[in-house]
Image (spheres, rainbow, N blue to C red):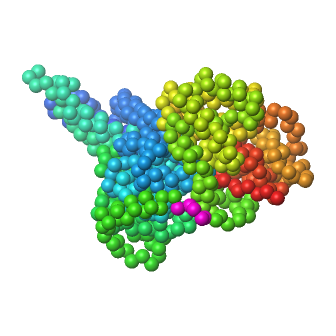
Amino acid sequence: MQDFFSHQEQARRNTTILVVLLLTAVTLIILAVYAAVTLGLFFGQLFLDQLMINSFWDESRFVWTVAITLAVVCGGSLYRSNQLRQGGGAAVAEMMGAERVPAATDDPLLRRLLNVVEEMAIASGVPVPPVYLMQQSGINAFAAGFSSSDAVIAVTRGATELLSRDQLQGVMAHEFSHILNGDTLLKMRLMGLLYGITLIADAGILMITARNSVAYSRSERSSHPALMVIGFMIFMVGVIGAVFADMIKRAVSRQREFLADAAAVQFTRNPTGLAGALKTIGGYKGGSRINHAASQQTSHFFFGNAVKSWENKDWWATHPPLVERVRRLEPRFSGDFKPLDSANRSAFVMHEAVSAFAGTEGMILAGLNASVDTVMDSIGHPGANELQQARILLARIPQRLADFAHDPFTARATMYALLLDSSAKIRTVQLEQLQKEADASVFREMLEIQPVVAQLEAELKLPLIEMMLPALKELSKTQFDTFRSCIRTLTQADEKIGLFEYMMQRMLLRHLYPAFLKIRSMAVYFDAAGEIVDEAGAIIAMLIGKGSHDRPATVFEAAMGIFSDGHLPAMPELGDDLLSVLDDALRRAERASPPIKRRLLKACVFAVLADGKTTVPEIELLRIIADALGVPMPQIRLKTP
């Protein structure tokens, strides 16, 4: 199975292939449109006394055809791609009529859904994505977004009401694998690039239905017959182009579904959960169908077939056959789906959600013998150990803090409380400044929750922050501006930035701010380790400095040997301004190619584990590095002597 970095590199290659296919399709469409225009003009001669065309080929006519066709196709693709880029995964969810699930919902089915998503996110090492609900009776779900920062999960009402917790967990693991494997990025780009082709058919319809555009008779004001013929032929060209685009979209979707199923089983170690969800779809009269006007455009995002495909035409379906998917999970499956009694099933699911919502009491996590290889293997492919650990971490967070984290109002108060300094003198300054800037009610909530936050174990702060991100994304622009200003005030009160403060600012900049501000994406610039060897040396040296190594120089040399095969620099003296050096190094490292990022992160993991112990500062710094590189790193357990 490919690792996370290989999937990133493959996503880059697949995007190139899609562009090539798009250019091929556009070239064929241009030729077809030219033929349609020429034949339409030839037909128009029958209604006029003058000759309109002398030959099939005309350079001027071809240039105009190319210009107009490219304007329609490229303009449509750029428009839709920009629309998706600005809205991220939420744009797709809203296109499907889905509504955001409030983080503090009282609905037990939705609370169960949010709990499962939180577990998956913490176990995967990605920010907790916002969850959307589609009021559809079909059992389905999808993940959408260009990255984990703007990804969302959308689930149908049918899935929440008819799937047990294990089955829902299997579906969510499937969707998270799409995020981790870069499938959602590919599908978002595919949706944007192919949109322009579908506009060709719309242009043909516009020409057919136009009125008073060209009058070929003084007594009759209507479209010229030649224009109607051209419009009809262009419409047919557009239909053929749309079919071609749809075939590409469906082929890409089918190719990735088996991989996502396999990754989901690896994640949960429970093939019966995912298989049970597929069997439920097969036995349910509504299946996984989505009745929405935009379902055709978004069909390649879904867990199951969202639109009805031709009977026995597997090559045309967006997903592999249900029977084949189940048999890969349960080889002895007979192929017969038991009809589902939806009334009894929904009653059972509701009872399960109400009576056994959390289900984390009494769980014991087996000892983790972390190694460089096991940590690297878990990146992008979390397993049952990571999922179990996430459940335990979430269970250890005080319930009151968990409730605060799920509400946009109190999440701000909790975030402010996390940034209060341990020094009474500095904390007094922070409180005085915060009282002037923050909303009065939020400030009061912060004072109330601060004693609970002060007692929070250091290991639980990062999961708590990740839990708060969906709620903070619900802020209005005015509330966000105030929140951002208060965060800056709290971190600068003592005129220096600590490691935890820097980590929080980095996380907010990467995963929260893009929801409110336009953040430029970083293009890949460095493809060789030697181009960022000094920056890698500085990063690794900082990690070594956070540990308790007997021979740090030897550890540095070994770690740099993992990163680079060329000349290795001596261990640098970093001075006092460590975070400034780290920030500059990460700004260059985040522009490296996936293979270089993998080597850098592997060297960093080695530096952390080399002394046989892990501490909170080491984990925080490693998380900063992984997050800056865009790598979903699961939580590493603390190991103390």
Q: In which quarter of the image is the C terminus?
A: bottom right
Question: Between residues 414 and 239, which one lies in front from this camera angle?
Answer: 414
Secondary structure mainly formed by the magenta segment:
loop
Left or right of 178 on screen, residue 500? right
Is residue 27 visible from the viewing direction of this image? no
- Determine whether 413 is above or below 12 in the image: above
- Determine whether 612 is above or below 275 in the image: above
Where residue 354 appears, x then y in whole percent? 43, 58
Q: In which quarter of the image is the N terminus?
A: bottom right
Q: How many marks?
A: 0
Question: Between residues 12 and 239, which one lies in front from this camera angle?
Answer: 12
* Residue 417, quarter of the rendered image: top right
Question: Residue sitting at 89 percent across and 44 percent down?
Answer: 570
Is residue 573 visible from the viewing direction of this image? yes
Question: Residue sitting at 76 percent across and 46 percent down?
Answer: 617
Farthest-out residue, left: 219
Left or right of 45 on screen, residue 7? right
Question: Residue sitting at 61 percent across and 22 percent down?
Answer: 436
Where residue 607 appears, x then y in whole percent? 80, 52
Question: Between residues 183 and 193, which one lies in front from this camera angle?
Answer: 183
Does 362 lie within the magenta span?
Answer: yes
Question: Between residues 516 and 88, which one lies in front from this camera angle?
Answer: 516
Where residue 43 appears, x then y in whole percent? 20, 36
Residues in magenta? 359-363
Does 447 lie within the magenta span?
Answer: no
- Determine whether 384 is above or below 461 in the image: below
